[in-house]
Image (cartoon, rainbow, N blue to C red):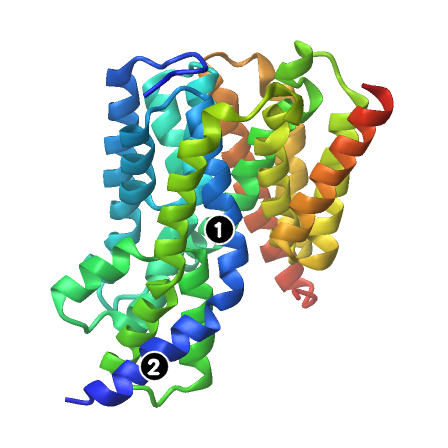
Amino acid sequence: MPSATAKSYFWKAVRDSFPFVFVAGPFGLLFGVLAAEAGLNLVEIMSFTVTVFAGSAQFTALQLLREEAPTLIILASALAVNLRVAMYSASLTPYLGAAPFWQRVLAAYLTVDQSYSLSIVQYEKEPQMSLPQRMAYFFGANGLIAPVWYSATLVGALVGAQIPESWALDFAMPIAFLAMIGPMLRTLAHVVAALVSIVAAILAVGIPYNLGLLVAGVAAMMAGAQMELWLKRRGRFA
Amino acid sequence: MTNSGTPFDPVTLWIVIVGMAVGSFALRFVFIGLVGSRRMPDWMLRHLRYTAVAMLPALVTPLVIWPSATDGQPDLPRMSAAAVTLAVGFWTKNVLAGIIAGAGTLYLLLWLFG
């Protein structure tokens, strides 16, 4: 058993993940606060955050719940926001796919932006890592972040309802989303997808049942994919 | 436990929570758990790459243009805060920097014009 070296990779990942504490902490806090403000009780908020474990999808569902969108639309839209984790799952499969079943179940639950981005960089940097070492690193990438996320949500949920209206928390959600979008605009194709998304959302505002969000999302996704192809053909894809 | 806002129908809420828990897990498990080492088609990966950046702007745009706090009237402090958040997030690639800059802009302008 290479458990000693696997253990050191676990702790390396915990150290590497440290900067993400300052993302997961405030985000978890904000989710707890906004969910409490929206009228969810402590059990509901914590069940939500522990079982779903996906920040942007949770914020999306919360916003659509507040808009009283139909249940199916809420689910479809929030899961669509989270479709990227399917891409992460696909991209991790060559590295972790041979692990024991229970480890893959746990790894699937723990597949989030932070653990994915840290791990894929590490695996590419040290291709000779063994499977147990890779798994240990992947779990370590959540060893600190997951507890921070849960406890920050808990704190937010506990203080949430006491925050006065003058703090203008109505706009915390848009600011949180916009702050997430900024760093996503890595290539021209991402920028095009975002622009199509904005324009389509404005045009689709009259579509009932909040379906406009899904329509705009699909249009923007296709625009991004087409732009990527076009840029590739011109040999300028960055 | 108190409900300060509009409480949702608990049944709807629990359907959403359970549905999202199952759905999110399925999305994460489908490849690493079931597909194994088979390769995914390029066109699928190409579309999945843009899901977040395609959905989130569509979600946030109406909230920025027609904010609920002003009964849907376009509002200078909120629009400016949105623009600053996006710009700072883009240039710094730092989510937290975007949030702080955006919240700072919002509070400053609400204090000046509010």
Residue marked by disc 2: A9
Element under label 1? helix
- Percent coordinates x, y for residue B44 in the rendering: 41, 52
* Pick the front one: A48 or A192: A48
Left or right: residue A136 versus residue A12 is: left
Establish if A136 lies above or below A39: below
Q: Are marks 2 and 1 in contact (CB under 8 Å)?
A: no
- Using the image, determine if residue A171 lies above or below residue A119: above
Quadrant in which the C terminus of chain A appears: bottom right
Query: What's the residue type where badge 2 is placed?
Result: Tyr
Q: Using the image, tell me which numbered label, if any, was put on residue A25.
A: 1
Using the numbered discs, state the Cα–Cα distance from disc 2 to disc 1 in whole angstroms: 23 Å
In the picture as drawn, the residue positioned furthest to the right comes out as B112
Say which of A42 and B51 sits in front: A42
Q: Chain of mark 1?
A: A
Q: Is residue B34 above or below residue B88?
A: below
Tell me, yes or no, if residue B40 can be seen here: no
